[in-house]
Structures are given as C-alpha cells and as structure tokens.
Image (spheres, rainbow, N blue to C red):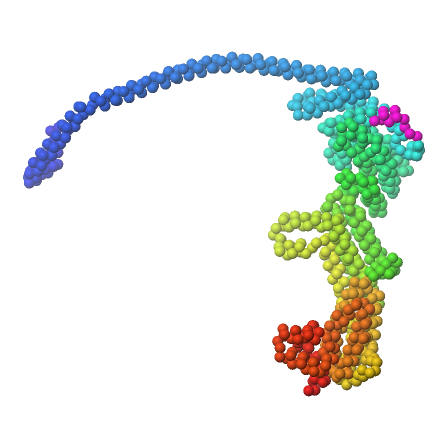
Amino acid sequence: MDVKVKVIKKFNNELGSALKNLKEIERIHIKLEYDKSKVEESLSLASSEAPSKIQEAVQEVTQIVKCINDMKESCQSVSLSIEERLQQENKTSELQTIIDDITYLERSSLYLQFVKFIEDLSTELEVSLLSGNDEACISSYVILKETSQNLDSSLCKNLKNYVDSTLNYWYTEIRKKLAGEYAEILKALKWPFLGNNLTTTTTPSHETIARFKIITEHLFHLQLPDSMIKQPSAGLSASFPPVCLPVTLLVLPLKQRFLYHFTGVKQTNRRDKPEWFLTQTLTWIRDHFEWVEKMVQPIAYTAGFDKINVKVQFMRALVQLAVEKLNSELAIVQFDDALFAHTVDEALGFERELRESLFYPASEPATVFVLTQAQIFVKWITMEKKYATERMDAILSSDTAWARLPSFIKDDMKVTECADAFLTLLSTISDRYNHLPQPGHRLQFLDLQLELIDDWRVRLLQLLHEDYKDPLLSLMPSILNTLYYVTIILQDWGVSVPFLKLYFFKKQFEDAEVVMHEDDFSDSFIEDSEKEITVFDEVISLLQRLENKLMTEIGDFVFMEIKAKSRPYCNEKWFAMSFDKDTIPSVTPTGCPMFQEVANRLNGLNNALALPLFERSWISLAKRLDQYLFDELVLRNQFNAGGAAQLQFDIKRNLFPLFGLYTNKSDSYFSLIGEACILLNMLIGSAMLLIEALEDEEENLNKEVLADVNIYQLSGRMALKVLKSRMDISTR
C-alpha cells in the first residue's frame, strides 16, 4: 500500500468525519513529533551497537562450523575403525573355525583313547579271568564300574551305553565264575544248614574260611551300580529292594529247595497247609541268620559297604519267597472262607514271629503287605467280623457264660467268663492288626472292634428283658459286673501307646474331613473333640450309661424292699414310749424286719456285685435310707424322751453297725438322722435356748449356732422342725 494512502487512512481514523475534530490536529502533530524523536534515538543506538552484536553472531557461527567439522572427522575415524575391525573379525572367524576343528580332533582323539582304555580294561579282565587272578580281575572291574558311574551325567549316550554293556558283560562272566567257586566253598562249609548239616560238628578248615571271605568280598565289589539294576515297577517285587550279590548266592540253594517243595504237584505243596511253607521259611531264617551276621557282615564292613545290613537282606530275601507264595495262594483260597481264614491266621502268626522273635525291622515288607491289598483286605475284615460275631454269640450262649472264672473266685472284681472271653476276642483282633503298617487299615479294624463292643452291649440289654422277681437273683448282677470289668479294661487300653496312636491318626482323619467340608464345621465339633481323649470314649459312655441304669434299678428295688419293711417302724408310737436307763435297752420290735432286710440286702449286694459297684450301691442306699428315715420317721412323728432315746439306740446301735461292716465311718453317711437324734435327745434347757437363737438369728448366723452343737447338715428351718417334734417342747 502507498505511504500517502496509509497517511490519509490514518488521519481519517483519527479525525473522523466531523469538522469539530480538526482541533485534534495539534495533538496528533505533537504525538508524531514524539514518535519521530524515539525512532531517531533508536536508529542512533542501533548504529553504535550493531558492530559488536554482529561480531558475536559471526563468532558463534564460526564455532558451530568448527564443531561440525570435528564431528565429521570423528565419524570418518570411527568409520575407518569399523572397517578395520570387520576385516579383523573375518580373520578371527577363520581362526575360530581352525580352533573348532582342532578341538573336534582332540575330543575325537580323547574319545578314541577312552574307548581304547575300555578295550584295554576288557583285555586285562579277560587275561585275569582266564589266568584265575581274581584279585586283578576284581580291581579292573571296580575301575570299569567307577568309570561307568562317572559317565552317568555325560551326554555321550552311545559311549555310556558301550561302557554299560561292557560292564554288564564282564559282570555276567565274573559272576558265573565266582558263583561256581562260591557254591563249592558253601558246600565245604556245609551250607545251607539243613538235615545232617545242621547237626554236624565238623569245623571247616582255615583255608576254606579264608577263601570264603575273599570271594565274598569280591562279590561285594562285583555288585552292579544301582542305576544298572532293574527295579520292578509294579507288583509285590517292587516292595522288595534287591539284595546284595553275596546274599543272593547264599539264598539260592534255599530258594531252590523252596521251589522244589512248595510248587508244582509235590505233596508238600498243599493249599490247606500254608503253615508248611511259612514255618519252613521261619526255620531257615532262625537257623542261618546268626551265622550270616557273624561271618558275612564283617566282610561287608571291610569292603567298605557299611550301609549294607546283611542279616536283614538275608531275611528279606527269604521272606520274599514266602510272600510271593502267599500271594499266589490267597488269589485262589479267597473264595473258600475256611481256607482263607486259616491262611490269614497263619500269615499273621508268621508276621508276629518274624517281628517279635526274629526282630525283623518294621520298615521291611512281610506278609501283611499281601493281606492289605484292596481285594484281600476287604475279604479279610469281612471274615474277621463274621467270625467275631459267631464267637460272641457262642460266648453269650455258653452255659457258663456268667460263671466266675476260677482264678477270680476270691477276687473282688467277680470277673465272669463272658467278660474275660469277650476281652480276649477284642485283644486277639488287636494283636492281628497291630503289625499293619498303614494307619488307615488299623483304623478300619478299630471301627470293627467298636462295632463289636456296641453289638455286645445291645445283646446284654436284650438278655435283661427276661422276667425276674428279684434282680439280685437274676443275671443282672453278673451282667453288671461284666459291664464294669469290660469298661475299666477298655479305659486302660485307651491310654496305652497303640490305641493313643490310633486316636491321633483318627483325629487327623477327622480334621482332614472337616477341612474338606468347612460348611459343616461348628463349635459342637470342637467341644466333642475336646471331650474325647481315647478311641473308646464313646462306647465306654454307652456301657457306663447301661451300667448306671442297672445300678439304679437294683438300688431302687433294694430300697423299696427295705422301705416296705420299714412302714410299721416309721408308724411306731414314738410319743408314748418308755425308756429305762437302768435296764439294758433293746431294739424296737417293729424295726427288726427293717434292720434284718437291710442286713440281708447288703450281704446280697456284697456277694453279687464287684467291690467298686458294691461300694457305690451301699453308699447310695445309705444316703437314700438316711433321707427316708428323716422325712418319714422324724418329721412325721412326735417324740417323748423315751421315744427319742429309743430312736437313738436303734440308729446308733443297730443301723450304723450294719453299714459298719463295710466302712469305718458309717455315721458319716447318715448325717440327717444322726443330727436329728442329737436334737431330739438334747437337754430341754439347751433345746429351748437353741430354738430361741434359731428364731431370732439370720440364716448365716444359724449355721454358726448349729455348729456349736455339732449340727452341720440340717438347716436352721429343719432343725426347728425337729426340735418342735419333741413332746416336751410342742406341749409348752
């Protein structure tokens, strides 16, 4: 836009279209002059500062150019270095290829040297074996075996297979030779000790024994590494770890005899006689294991095989023969209950003899391993229940079931044949399952025992339904004694080590089930768990409940009989009796039937019940009779001096002595009637003062007042009733 046009436009904007605004020209002129002066000043200042600023800008640009040039040179230098390095890398790669080839050739050479080493060992073994140099042969073999073990972690599978094949070949060859020599030496030692060999008194020569020790040591060293021994993955054999080579050869002649006698159609191989092969196995173990421990174990220590227990391995090898035979027999006889039960009995007897007499370790497998196989175990426990139930029926139906055992005739427990036979049955079951290794199997047998105990309780309860007039003349006392004896024996069993272990395992299983069913977990479960301390607590509680019921029934009957005979005595005219101190007092005639009944019943209870039960019964009877006489005789009658004196004589000289036969402090069980006699026979003055004190004092003070006159059980209110039943007081 032209400057002139800009000026015109600016004036138009400042002055507008009105003529009156022309006076603003002067102000505009002043402003323009001012702006002009400012511009001139700026131009003057710029002309003086420009050279220095331009110089600074030129210097900065120069520095930037220099940096760029330096960086360019650096890049060129790096580029050259990279090119040189790449050329060197190419040379290194070529060199590495040469090195790899050399390494490969060295390894191949070492590989061939190793193969040559194995071949040389094989040559040495062959030469030693052919020349009969057993010592050198075993030394080379041990080197070969150690070499094979060192290759276990090697990735050279073909080389490993080659060495193992070589080792296995020489193992077979050396074993064949040493086994033949070993057999000859064992024959010279009269091994095995059977028949005439068992009773021979010939002592082997020193040369024979020395040769036996040398070859035995060679056999220990000949043993293959564990990694090359084939372990059975399933079946019974998987539970029997392989035994060392000397034991294998020692057992071999016994194994041959076992197979000869107990397989095939031999007369000694009978399914109805499992005890034959089991007993034979035990006999062989018993006749040989001490010699094996004495002669072979020291050789194992000398050869450096400290962890090998030769005696246990020898026993295990023979036990394996019996177990495999038993397993094959059970698979057939399980369908015949009689044969199956007999076979199980013999197997358990074998296990018990093996563990307890021959000290076969609990960690080693034996016959119970066969019995605890699922199908066999279910059959076994079913048969146990069947025969136990039949035995229990026979016990209860026996004519002498409730007779006392001869050895317990004079015993206070009055043990019956039924109690002893039933506990023997339970104990026999415990003995049969104590050697089972798995807690779950033992707990199943424990459940069977608990079921039998409860079934036995129900059958006893059924026997009590028979009609009877006098419970003391029925089966009830015998059943009561039986219940009590069985209960205390179960309590003793419950705190024994085997059953405490079962209780521990049982609680573990129950806790595991609770965790699996958390919704059912409740405080009641915790309370029940805290109350139970033995596995028999629940059944003991049921037995004690029945015991208490029978005790109550007998106690009620005896008390009712005594109560019936006491009515004339309670209704006696105590207010009109005379009592002469100068004459010898006698019992009240109406009290004789009651006292006689008490004496007869106490004697009957003593003869019928076990001592602890009798003590409970007479104590309960004494307390009930005490309360009854106090309520029905003292509180319902009036007494003159003669009546009070006669009552005191009857109680202290007739009733107390009846119970005094069974305790030294019979009066302590008749506190109510005894204290009533004290109040009734108190001097009239003392009685009046006592009444006055009891009526005026509070209940707490009444106890102190009564204690001063030896009254401890009666309350103040009851004491006043007794005192006011005196004629000399009530008529005032």
Q: Nearer the viewer, residue 202 or 345?
A: 202
User: Can residue 397 be seen by looking at this rendering?
Assistant: no
Quarter of image, res 61: top left
Residue 22 percent location from the top left of the image: 6, 38
Residue at point 76% right, 29% down? 305
Of 338 and 159, which appears nearest the observer? 159
- With respect to residue 242, does 651 lie above or below? below
**Magenta-drawn stretch contains 60:** no
Report x, y in % for residue 288. Answer: 86, 35
Residue under the image location 68 percent in, 48 percent down: 508
Asked whether the viewer can see residue 65, the reply is: yes
Residue 369 x, y percent position in the rendering: 77, 41
Q: Is residue 2 above or below residue 351?
A: above
Pick the quarter of the image with the N terminus. Answer: top left
The residue lying at 82 percent from left, 79 percent from top is 587
Seen in the image, is 457 located left or right of residue 72?
Answer: right
At x 74%, y 75%, the residue is: 673
Look at the picture and state if 106 lies above or below 45. above
Q: Majority secondary structure of the magenta segment?
A: helix
Range of magenta residues: 202-213
Q: Nearer the viewer, residue 130 or 598?
A: 598
- Location of the C terminus by quadrant is bottom right
Where residue 259 sits in the image (x, y, percent)?
86, 34
Q: Quadrant of residue 627?
A: bottom right
Position above or below: 169 against 630: above
